[in-house]
Amino acid sequence: MSRFFSKAELDSQCEAYLLQAHDTECHIDDTVKYLRALQSRVPKVDVWMELSDFNKSRKKGVTGPNIKYAFRRFVAGLQGNRCCYCCRWLVNNANAKPIEHILPRESYPQFSLEFWNLAVACCDCNLLKKNLNWGSFNKSLTDYPLATAFTDFYHPRFHRYGEHVSYDRRETNYVCNVTYTGHTPQGKHLCSEMLYIIAARENFYSHNPPLAEAVSTIQEFQSSLLPGELPALEAFLKCLDDSTQSQLDDSGVDNAPLRG
């Protein structure tokens, strides 16, 4: 099996999305027209927040939140309702499965609404990656790179996950052990930059039930919020992540067992 989705498969995905761009059939054409108008801006700029704010006070019709909801549902379906990076199940809450910009908006604002640049991640992976720029592409590009150009890192919309990364998850009532193995340069990069950290934290939490329960409660509450709505909570979670990582470093836990 190819490590990339074929052009025919990608074309099929795009065609399928254009038929599902809004939950209500009578709004699909207007939704597509609006999105194409945003994408046709010259010069290309970051229009993500403009999309987010579009008619957001309305509950029905062509609105930014409704467009993002339909897109999230479509792409999550392509991903089997799993995070595009760690492959854990996505929680059935919009804010708990943020839309991920694969080439970050901060570095590539012109691709803020590019269909192929958007995936669906879990909160952990989305926050861990944030604005990290893993690519070596010219930041002044006007056309999105072809799938074959992504040799530096794993691209969740172009690459077949199982060809690049495999994972093993073993759970009991009290303990969870997760391992990830990279099979290609892209998969190994994803493991070293993100998945080893995700696995180490999850394994660490599972061996500390009170901490795991507290983190679960915080994440459940956070899932009801919009990004940036409670910056103090986000700052606290960042400190918690840093503290957890420090505990792992001090304990001498090596990433090697996580590499399979």
Image: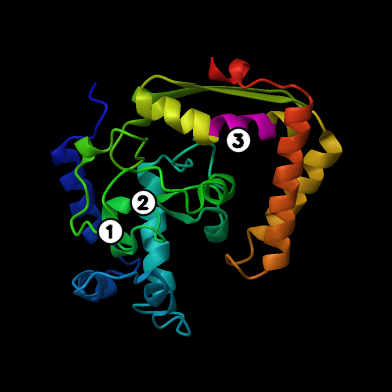
Amino acid type, callout 1: Glu
- Residue of label 1: 114
Magenta range is 195-202
The vertical placement of 240 against 158, above or below, is below
* Rendered image coloring scheme: rainbow
The vertical placement of 244 against 225, above or below, is above
Q: Residue placed at 31% from the left, 43% from the top? A: 136
**CA separation, marks 2 and 3?**
20 Å
- Residue 198 is labelled as 3
Q: Is residue 206 visible?
A: no
Relative to 147, 22 lies left or right: right
Amino acid type, callout 2: Leu
Q: Is residue 6 visible?
A: yes
In magenta segment, residue 198: yes
The residue lying toward the viewer, choosing from 45 and 113, is 45
Label located before the other in sequence (1 or 3): 1
Residue 68 appears at what percent x and percent y?
A: 40, 65
**CA separation, marks 2 and 1?**
10 Å
**CA separation, marks 1 and 3?**
27 Å
Task: Say whether marks 2 and 3 touch (CB < 8 Å).
Answer: no
- Residue of label 2: 103
Relative to 27, 63 lies left or right: right
Residue 36 appears at what percent x and percent y?
A: 20, 70
Q: Residue placed at 60% from the left, 35% from the top? A: 198
- Residue 134 is labelled as none
Depth check, mark 2 against mark 1: the one in front is: 2
| Prevailing secondary structure class for the magenta stretch in the rendered image | helix
